[in-house]
Image (cartoon, rainbow, N blue to C red):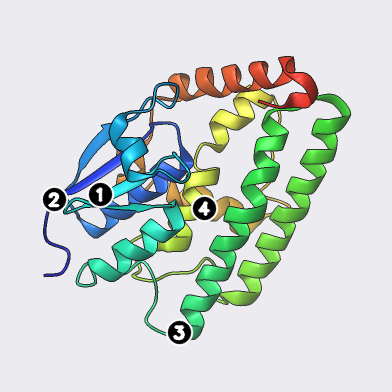
Amino acid sequence: MAGEGRVTLHGTWASPYSKRVELALKVKGIEYEYVEEDLMNKSSLLLQYNPVHKKIPILVHNGKPIVESMVILEYIEETWSDGPRLLPEDPYERAKIRFWATFLHQQVFEVLVLVLKTDGEAQAKAMEQLHEKLKLLEEGIKGSFPGGSPAVNGENMGLLDIVVCSYFGPYKVHEEVLGLKYLDSEKYPLVTSWVKSLVQYPAVKESTPPHEKSVALVRYFREKALQSPAGVL
């Protein structure tokens, strides 16, 4: 099989980008070694494998590094093609999945981070933008996938599920730190029920860090951002 060989994932426990690769490997049933990286003291292997961006995640397959989380997800899908599918076979359905995954990757997460690292008027503005994105996602998913949230294999998570979960899976952590909610079952019933069902998947539960550990990290991130000029880290 094309996917045979040694697989190593270099990541950090709190990174949504690492988390999505971890979930994809678990969904596919791929055995892998995990290497926790310290981004304040980057390893020589990290710098060797990703000399351009010097970031995680990095998937190393038979000694060959693949970087950028969305690229890695596509690589996993193509290389381990005999496992559960992350993308549907139909080209048009695949295109829709990729569109919404890119929308989340390029637009939604940036706004969510802005909400987490601001307060007062700036946070109110960021929250308004987040709600606009969530409204677009709700309406878009409803229009693109008549059956509700996209399903590739029924019981198994697909690529878009993984991307959604990597960003919104820790919603309870975000809401506890912020003291406010952004997932509203009345405004966004489809997205809210989708996220709440995703966090119940065994693979997600298995890879979810302890709640209090995540709360402490996000609170630290928020406090540090608020102390920095213009909320810049």
Task: Classify mark 1: helix, strand or loop.
Answer: strand
Task: Give the quadrant of residue 219.
Answer: top right
Task: Give the quadrant of residue 172.
Answer: top right
From the viewer's perspective, is 62 left or right of 179? left
Which quadrant, please, contains the N terminus?
Answer: bottom left
Q: Residue at x 88, y 30 (%)?
A: 121
Residue 187 spot, x, y in % from top left? 73, 53
Which of the two residues, 104 or 233, is positioned nearer the viewer here?
233
Labels 4, 1: front one: 1
Task: Classify mark 3: helix, strand or loop.
Answer: helix
In three-dimensional space, the C-alpha distance between marks 4 and 1, rounded to whole angstroms, equals: 24 Å
What count of labels does the image hold? 4
From the viewer's perspective, is 89 left or right of 148? left
Residue 163 spot, x, y in % from top left? 48, 54
Residue denoted by label 4: 164
In three-dimensional space, the C-alpha distance between marks 2 and 1, rounded to whole angstroms, equals: 8 Å
| Disc number for residue 91 | 3
Residue denoted by label 1: 60
Labels 3, 4: front one: 3
Which of the two residues, 4 or 156, is positioned nearer the viewer here?
4
Q: Residue at x 62, y 46 (%)?
A: 109
Residue denoted by label 2: 6
Residue 190 spot, x, y in % from top left? 60, 59
Q: Is residue 181 shown to the viewer in this render? A: no
